[in-house]
Image (tube, grey):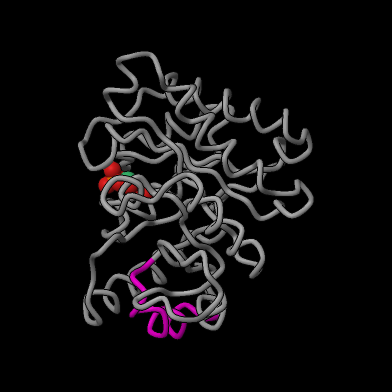
Amino acid sequence: MRRKLVAGNWKMNGSLEANARLLAALLELSAKESGSMKAEMAVCIPFPYLPQVAQLLQGSQIAWGAQTLSEFDSGAYTGEVSASMLSDFQCQYVIVGHSERRQVFKESNLQIAQKLRAAITAGLSPILCVGETLEERESGETLSVVYEQLDSVLNTLDPGSCEKLVIAYEPVWAIGTGKTAKPEQAQEIHAALRSRLSEFDKALAEMTPLLYGGSVKADNAESLFGQTDIDGGLIGGASLKAQDFIDICKAVA
Ligand code: 13P
């Protein structure tokens, strides 16, 4: 059985006060549902709140992580945050190569591969995001785009070091738009990614959780998570509402 995971990506949202409220509600709701919850839960939060979240979630069933990291270990890289700094705050996860990092901050496949390697070396569980834009989908390039995003990372790694790898398929046209991929559409790409992964390493392909992200809500989560190769979700907007996030977590069968 593969691990199931639902991770919230808070993006650049929150405040000390709002986080405290959201986390208290998540802890209360998740404790009530703990018997029936099949998925691991995690929240990926803005850097400054790591101490707050580490303190509030310590010992709970909710893990935490960051939304990006530096490819460098330390040194003169103003504004950057390294993998070992994330480990200092007991982060378990870090999102790598989110489409907003690729598009807004111009992160390249090469840089993303270096970041992912830094995460793995520090013992973090990287959530590698791949996904095509609407234009790429409409011109029939979806598979070539996501394969290139995946291959550029895998080519730099040894399969034996990838046991903590998580991959998220997030079609860019579905992020924050309310336009979710149809379950069969998502399944098709997830199956293709798993088979690409099996060319790299069969056992790894079987055990790597493949998450879907892009306008996942409580009312569409069950049909998405019901697909054979969808092992959970990476949730943006709906992860900022405790009841919605928990309902999405509960939709993992
Ligand atoms: P939304 O769930 O808001 O569409 O965001 C998805 C996402 O980007 C998660 O990383």
Residue 1 picture location, percent across and down = 72, 41
Residue 75 picture location, percent across and down = 49, 81
Q: Main secondary structure of the magenta part?
A: helix
Q: Which one is in front, 70 or 173?
A: 70
Up-down relation of residue 21 to residue 118 (above or below): below
- Examine the image and state in which quarter residue 51 appears: bottom left
Q: Which one is in front, 77 or 29?
A: 77
Q: Residue at x 39, y 56 (%)?
A: 8
Left or right for 171, reference 123: left
The question of residue 86 being in magenta is answered with no
Residue 124 picture location, percent across and down = 60, 65
Up-down relation of residue 39 to residue 62 (above or below): above
Left or right for 220, reference 184: left
Q: Residue furthest front?
A: 76
Q: How many marks?
A: 0
Left or right for 183, reference 136: right
Q: Residue at x 47, y 51 (%)?
A: 6
Q: Which one is in front, 163 or 143?
A: 143
Up-down relation of residue 77 to residue 170 (above or below): below
Q: Which residues are magenta?
A: 45-58
The question of residue 46 being in magenta is answered with yes
Residue 231 picture location, percent across and down = 55, 40
Q: Quadrant of the C terminus?
A: top right
Up-down relation of residue 6 to residue 252 (above or below): below
Q: Could one spot residue 252 in this view of the protein?
A: no
Q: Residue at x 45, y 28 (%)?
A: 145
Left or right for 72, reference 208: left
Q: Could one spot residue 172 in this view of the protein?
A: yes
Q: Residue at x 43, y 67 (%)?
A: 66
